[in-house]
């Protein structure tokens, strides 16, 4: 005989109803986490006017990809291949990648080799090219190996350097989180080029140290990755807290666009956030 017999009558009905409710809620939570983690990226759009872009210049649409984090279980190369096809279908003029190509944390089920990580990215196509800066996970994993694999593609890698892409001068900051960034060197490199200035950085934290009027494309924060109802994100990897957590931030004369990224970090799960691709249209200020 059971020491704690299951309730009978009305009590039994109430207990069964509670258990059924808990089961339904748990199922919905699991479904949402799966959808948020593995769903196709959201495509978010915004327009930024540039004071140093000459009047009459045709608009330039830039696709911003960040925090790809190729690893098992949630971002195998095959999934990245599908995302690359989705990005190409958007037909951007230029594609920029804000680092963190890989993830190799404790909860990762499979760590891929540099060539496996880079191979899908070689399929990205845009008339003005593809530009990339490294992130903290790239430096922690094997940046020389990743860079060697990237050298076999047409992707332009910037480490505190600049590159002219049509009417834009892209300054690519190396990763600030690991202390590899050099803002003065990047700005000097940009000054040597024609074109309106855009900063590509893995994370948004260099923004306060940049000149007035700067436009920054960044990631790193994952938009919190896990955001609970009524509570919000459980944490943002930034020394400025939630100041640059997610999305477009217009701060004085500066504009920062922070993508939620594509993959995951630390835990292979998203909740309350989705993978993101930003399409940013740059126009002359007078138009």
Image (cartoon, helix red, strand yellow):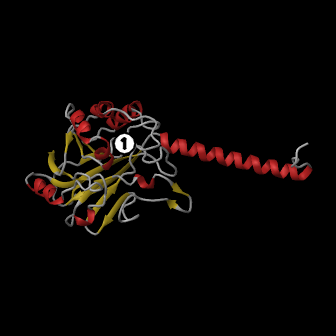
Q: Which residue is mark 1?
A: 68
Query: Compared to 117, does 168 lie above or below?
Result: below
Placement of the C terminus among the 4 image quadrants = bottom left
In this image, 99 relative to 21: left or right?
left
Number of marks in picture = 1
Q: Is residue 38 above or below residue 189?
A: above
Q: Residue at x 38, y 42 (%)?
A: 103
Closer to the camera, 274 or 285? 274
Q: Is residue 28 visible?
A: yes
Residue 260 position in % (x across, y down): 40, 51
Describe residue 209's horizontal placement relative to residue 189 as left or right. right
Q: Secondary structure at mark 1?
A: loop
Q: Where is residue 47 shown, x and y percent of the image?
A: 30, 54
Q: Residue at x 19, y 46 (%)?
A: 158
In this picture, residue 245 sits left or right of residue 28? left
Q: Where does residue 122 sit, x and y in percent of width and height?
A: 27, 32
- Residue occupying image coordinates x 28% and y 69%: 252
Could you tell me if residue 54 is visible in this image?
Answer: no
Name of the residue lying farthest toward the left: 192
Query: Which quarter shows the N terminus?
Result: top right
Quarter-of-image position of residue 108: top left
Q: Residue furthest bottom?
A: 252
Which of the two residues, 263 or 282, is positioned nearer the viewer here? 263
Across and down, in percent, residue 199 comes to 22, 54
Q: Quadrant of residue 31?
A: top right
Q: Residues within 10 Å of mark 1 (few under 14, many from 20)?
A: many
């Amino acid at each position: 005989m059971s020491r704690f017999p299951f309730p009978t009558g009305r009590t039994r009905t109430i207990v069964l109803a509670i258990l059924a409710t808990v089961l339904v809620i748990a199922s919905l939570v699991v479904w949402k986490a799966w959808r948020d983690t593995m769903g196709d990226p959201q495509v978010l759009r915004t327009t930024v006017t540039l004071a140093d872009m000459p009047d009459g210049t045709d608009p330039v649409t830039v696709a911003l990809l960040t925090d790809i984090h190729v690893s098992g279980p949630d971002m195998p190369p095959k999934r990245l291949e599908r995302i690359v096809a989705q990005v190409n279908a958007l037909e951007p003029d230029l594609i920029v990648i804000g680092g963190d190509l890989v993830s190799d944390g404790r909860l990762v089920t499979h760590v891929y080799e540099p060539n496996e990580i880079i191979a899908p990215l070689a399929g990205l196509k845009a008339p003005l090219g593809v530009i990339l800066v490294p992130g903290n996970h790239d430096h922690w994993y094997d940046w020389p190996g990743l860079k060697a694999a990237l050298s076999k593609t047409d992707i332009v890698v910037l480490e505190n350097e600049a590159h002219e892409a049509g009417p834009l001068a892209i300054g690519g900051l190396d990763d600030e989180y690991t202390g590899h960034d050099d803002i003065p060197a990047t700005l000097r490199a940009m000054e040597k080029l024609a074109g309106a200035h855009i900063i590509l950085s893995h994370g948004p934290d260099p923004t306060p140290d940049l000149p007035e009027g700067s436009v920054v494309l960044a990631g790193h924060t994952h938009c919190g990755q896990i955001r609970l109802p009524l509570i919000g994100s459980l944490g943002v990897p930034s020394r400025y807290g939630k100041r640059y957590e997610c999305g477009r931030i217009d701060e004085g004369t500066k504009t920062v666009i922070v993508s939620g990224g594509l993959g995951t970090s630390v835990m292979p799960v998203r909740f309350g956030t989705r993978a993101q691709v930003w399409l940013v249209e740059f126009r002359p200020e007078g138009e």
